[in-house]
Image (cartoon, rainbow, N blue to C red):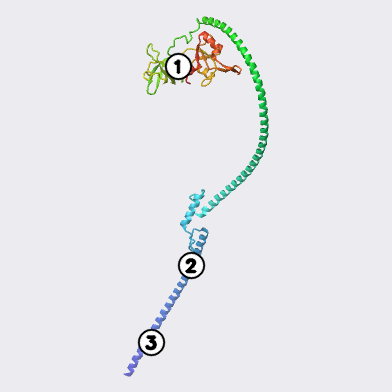
Amino acid sequence: MEQRSQRGAAKVSAVWLIVLFVFFFVALTFGYISNEETVAANKVADDAGRAEVIADGKLTAKTQEARDITEKLGFNDDQIVGSLSNLEAAQIGIDNLKAAFSDTDDTTNNYETLVPVVIRQYNGLLTLIAQKDATNADLQTQLATARESVATVSATKDAESRDLRTRLTDAENQAVEDKTALEADVASARSDRNDKDSQVRTLRGEYEDLSREAEKERLAHAARTDAMSKPLKFLKEPERPDGRVLAVSSTLGIGWINIGSKNRLDRGMVFHVVDGKPNSDSLKGWAEVTDVDESRAEVRFFDLADPYDPIVADDIIYNPVFDPTGERNAVLIGRFSGSYNEKQMSMLLADIGISVQKNVDAVTDYLIVGSEIYTDEDGEPYEDPLQPSELPAYKEAEATGVRIVPVREVRRYFKK
């Protein structure tokens, strides 16, 4: 019984020994496996550590690069240490630069493209400023030269002015002396001339009286002789109407007459308007030609005699020196000035078919008389103005029945 018990115990011990060996090998296997994983894990950790070191180095480099860019570019917050450039502020800076420098365009959108443009335009401005400075320096030089010249000229002018003033004073004093002497000579000469003029006028009056009597006889004889061949003078003819009123606009104060450019009518001619009723010679007013057609004309009415007896159609118009068909001749005597000088009067008369002659003769129709004459043919002044009625042409016109028309009457009928 004791022997069986020992064999049984020996079997158990062997089993446990085997189990222990199994566990040992299992533990040994697990230990080997764990050691391999630990080695692999350590390798991964080492690789991760090295990658982290590399990443930290790159980050440090990029951060330093960003800080270097910020240091050059700016646009960061000075109150925060290590702050980087603000992109929005940098873009505003770019926009401001583009607004300030006109050579930029849509392709100039960063500092790399903007800086060359700014430098180029800035250098251009510097060149322009240098040119302006050079021009200004040249102008300053010219101004200094001009001032020197002006000072020299002014000094010369002042010296000449003083010399001329002295000479002028001397000349004035001499002139006063000469004037006094000349006035004495003139007074003596005028006294002599007045005596001579008095004698001449006396002799001329006696001569003119004799000549006038002889001339009257000659002209009277000539007038009687020419009466058979010469048309009757305007003064001797009964005044006939030159036309009539066609229509009237009472609200506008205008009307139309039945004569026009084919009748030698021209703007500015004036007619007096007479009642057109038979056997009536009542003056109604005046009509001035304002527009001319071929066969009619527009007129402006003025100086109406009676507002209750207005100008109407079929009233008659007259102008004593207007003739639509005939050729007439006139002589001008006296002085013509003001609105009509002698040349203008001749042109006005020519427009209405009146030729201007030198002297009164058998074909003269009008003697148009101007104002008194102050100088003779040589330009010497008369002592008293000479009246046109004292001229031989006036007396000859009176003797032969030529129509004598004062210039004021012509002005009255022609408002050109």
Near-viewer residue (115 or 174)? 174
Could you tell whether 183 is left or right of 401 in the image?
right
The picture quadrant where one finds residue 21 is bottom left
- On the question of residue 345 being in view, the answer is yes
Name the residue carrying label 2.
56
State left or right for residue 392 relative to residue 95.
right
User: Earlier along the polypeptide chain: callout 3 or callout 1?
Assistant: 3
* Closer to the camera in the image, 400 or 17: 400
| Residue at (54, 10) in percent of width and height | 395
Residue placed under numbered mark 3 in the picture: 17
Which amino acid is tagged 1? Lys
Instruction: Measure how far apart labels 2 and 1 are at the Cα level.
Output: 117 Å
Residue at position x 62%, y 42% in the image: 143
Element assignment for label 1: helix
Q: Residue 262 bears which disc, if any? A: 1
Question: Which class describes the residues within 10 Å of circle 2: few (<14), some (14-19), or many (20+)?
Answer: few
Residue type pointed to by label 2:
Asp
